[in-house]
Image (cartoon, rainbow, N blue to C red):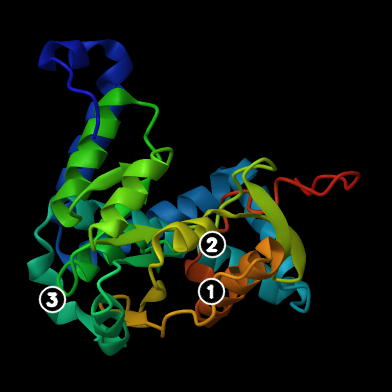
Amino acid sequence: MAESFSQSSFLHPRYWSAWLSIALMRLGAWLPWSLKLWLGKGIGLLAWRFAKRRRHITETNLRLAFPELNEPRHAALVKRTFIANGLGILETATGWCRDPEHLRHRVTFKGEEHMHRALAQGKGALIVGIHFSTLDLGGALHSLFFPADVVYRPHDNALFERFMTRARSRIFGQAIDRRDLRGLVRRIKAGRAVWYSPDQDFGRDASVFAPFFGIEASTVKLTAKIARMTGAPVMPLIFHRNPDDRSYTLEYLPALEGFPTNDEVADATRVNAVIEAAIRRHPEQYLWLHRRFKTRPEGEPGFY
């Protein structure tokens, strides 16, 4: 949980931008759905036009991941990715600031039997989440069906960190700092399901190189380590925005069988393959704006 701060400490000018962001998110969460769509698409298009650094990263990622696309199709996917992530800002606001019950009519949940079967073992569960633009709204919708904790990265701004952690703690049972491995393991051993997203580049020390869209990608070893330490089933969770932009589908796949093994690269490769298959269903909804292929094997030049 975020450290407790006196209210007066947040009046300092360094927090003014965070106050504005929080106010806008609270406002955006209560807008009519049609206005959310219009605003989210507008934010995405503005970022596509003016956020040149993020656009370069996205263009590079998509060229690496989908080399078969010709230039017009590649450019169209880049644009759709920014629009999807613009929508994701309003979806995040909704997930953090509204009771998810008001969205129950917008969600279809598939594969619930897989999670029920996993939890019946009494060993908790490790949920493999994915950094789709719908990530935080997906967590809110998931809470309508299954309770879970979540692993998260603390925000650098103390005020926004407190806002974000309190919001996620409403949705999830407990928000666990990603550096708190003991706390994570303790919750799983207590029979909890914990949502964990292993699809970002956390550097060389915590990772092995495993293929992801045909690229040797720095992939965290922690998924297999947690499964080994707890004996918990590893549950892939897919969630996406439907084509109407007004409804969502969440789907559990069966628990990974025979996982983990004694081969760190094989385990990381298997997790990446599950994530890649989910992304290929709706590639524009993935967070291609981050440098997924930042860390390279020794001697290889960087992509960005």
Label 3–label 1 contact, CB within 8 A? no
- Classify 293 as above or below 38: above
Q: Is residue 131 left or right of residue 220?
A: left
Name the quarter where the C terminus is drawn.
top right
Name the residue: 53% across, 74% down: 259
Residue 154: x and y in percent read 37, 35
Q: To which residue does mark 2 refer?
A: 224
Q: To which residue does mark 1 refer?
A: 259
Q: Is residue 206 left or right of residue 242?
A: right
Mark 3: which secondary structure? helix
Residue 71: x and y in percent read 76, 71
Mark 2: which secondary structure? helix
Q: Is residue 211 left or right of residue 123?
A: right
Q: Nearer the viewer, mark 2 or mark 3?
A: 2
Between the C-alphas of marks 3 and 1, the distance is 33 Å
Asked whether 80 or 291 is in front, the reply is 291
Q: Residues within 10 Å of mark 1 (few under 14, many from 20)?
A: some
Disc on res. 104: 3
